[in-house]
């Protein structure tokens, strides 16, 4: 995909390549293709950095964050930090409805990963929290972040402070 975009001579050619790739990514998302979910999100992040809309990939971030493996979580959190910010309506809805449906929203995964035994997953959650945190999310997660000041790993304590 990157080679095809770089090979484009005009902006119209680039838009056509991006449009075709976005259509392929949407199709893969609709088919719920587990094997290519992280690759699709990486492509979406590149497309986003080029300035094209990628809002349709926000749920893919959450699906990757919900997975058990570190590589998938890493891409999911990176996508969350890049594709979402504190002004996104999705995050406002997340904060408001956390208590009603706690296991359907990114703040649930952040909360779960802040309490994870793996220091690298805790670090991913802290970085994401620092990048996308709204005032409401900060208020809700402050006790968990304060608790991490006592974490056994010095790298996690450094990220908290």
Image (cartoon, rainbow, N blue to C red):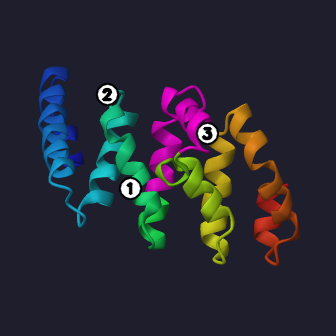
Identify the residue under disc 1.
Answer: 63
Q: CA distance from mark 3 to mark 1?
A: 17 Å
**Helix, strand or loop at mark 1:** helix
Judging from the image, what secondary structure is the residue with disc 3 in? helix
| Quadrant in the picture for residue 44 | top left
| 89 drawn magenta | yes
Residue 88 vs 113, above or below: the answer is: above
Query: Given this view, does label 2 or label 1 mark the residue nearer the observer?
Result: 1
Q: Is residue 145 magenta?
A: no
Q: In 3D space, how far apart are the residues under numbered discs 2 and 1 (Cα atoms)?
A: 22 Å
Q: Could you tell which of marks 3 and 1 lies nearer the N-terminus?
A: 1
Q: Marks 3 and 1: which is nearer the front?
A: 1
- Residue 149's image quarter? bottom right
Q: Residue at x 74, y 44 (%)?
A: 140
Disc ID at residue 132: 3
The region drawn magenta spans 75-100
Q: Which mark is residue 52?
A: 2
- Of 120 and 2, which appears nearest the observer? 120
SS for callout 2? loop
Taking the image as shown, residue 126 lies to the left or right of residue 142, namely left
Q: Main secondary structure of the magenta part?
A: helix
Crowdedness near tag 3: few (<14), some (14–19) or many (≥20) residues, C-alpha within 10 Å: some
- Please provide percent x and percent y for residue 10: 16, 23
């Amino acid at each position: 995909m990157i080679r095809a975009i770089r090979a484009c001579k005009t902006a119209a050619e680039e838009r056509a390549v991006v449009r075709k790739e976005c259509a392929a990514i949407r199709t893969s998302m609709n088919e719920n293709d587990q094997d290519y979910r992280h690759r699709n999100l990486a492509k979406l992040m590149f497309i986003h950095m080029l300035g094209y809309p990628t809002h349709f990939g926000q749920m893919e971030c959450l699906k990757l964050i919900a997975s058990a493996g570190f590589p998938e979580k890493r891409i999911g959190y990176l996508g969350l930090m890049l594709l979402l910010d504190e002004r996104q309506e999705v995050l406002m809805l997340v904060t408001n409805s956390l208590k009603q449906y706690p296991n359907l929203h990114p703040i649930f995964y952040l909360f779960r990963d802040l309490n994870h035994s793996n220091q690298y997953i805790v670090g991913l959650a802290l970085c994401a929290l620092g990048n996308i945190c709204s005032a409401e999310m900060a208020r809700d997660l402050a006790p968990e972040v304060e608790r991490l000041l006592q974490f056994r790993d010095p790298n996690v304590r450094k990220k908290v402070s």
